[in-house]
Amino acid sequence: YLAHHTIENLGRVVMLAPPNHGSEVVDALRSVPGFRLMNGPAGMQLGTEPDSVPSTLGPADFELGVIAGTSTMNLLLSLLLPDPNDGKVSVASARLEGMKDFVTVSRTHTFIMNAPEVIAMTRQFLASGQFASPASDIRPQ
């Protein structure tokens, strides 16, 4: 959306487990019967091929923080991804050029948004532009 539109006073943005470079899961399973039905047209656009939506993303030109997960509930899907991953997206794929901060948490893709530490880190980034307080000795992994 931001490649074609401007949002006045956008402010800071946090992405949770985004497939910024696509997901190998989509590449591997797109021809499996029922995959399109389960994931819809948007899901089909999230592969790693050059014309996929993630592959056309440019660098972030806004204050962006990314939180990626490193735990999985689906060991079969995790086998299709480089380690570490959250069962749907690899940590490497979550990164985006131009991001201001990046952190990983031991959470799965599906439920990362419900984790209390993710909520706290999101609030911290939106307030300060970084996931950890400058005075903090503890830095999220």
Image: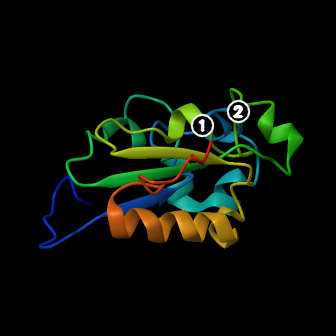
Q: In this view, does 117 lie to the left or right of 7?
A: right
Q: In this view, does 91 lie to the left or right of 111?
A: left
Q: How many other residues sit within 10 Å of disc 2, few (<14), some (14-19) or many (≥20)?
A: some
Labels 2 and 1: the sequence-earlier one: 2
Rendered view: 74 above or below 55: below
Residue beneath disc 1: 91
Query: In this view of the protein, can residue 63 be seen by the observer?
Result: yes
Which residue is more in the foreground, 88 or 15? 15
Residue 7: percent from the left, percent from the top?
16, 70
Kind of residue at disc 1? Val
Kind of residue at disc 2? Pro
Residue at position x 34%, y 44% in the image = 99
Q: Secondary structure under badge 1?
A: helix
Residue 51: percent from the left, percent from the top?
37, 34
Q: How far apart are marks 2 and 1 (CA)?
A: 6 Å
Which residue is more in the foreground, 26 or 120? 120
Which residue is more in the foreground, 91 or 3? 91
Residue 105: percent from the left, percent from the top?
67, 50
Residue beneath disc 2: 84
Residue at position x 46%, y 36% in the image = 21
> Label 1 near label 2: C-beta < 8 Å?
yes
Q: In this view, does 23 lie to the left or right of 32?
A: left
Residue 19: percent from the left, percent from the top?
52, 45
Q: How many other residues sit within 10 Å of disc 1, few (<14), some (14-19) or many (≥20)?
A: many
Rendered view: 54 above or below 38: above
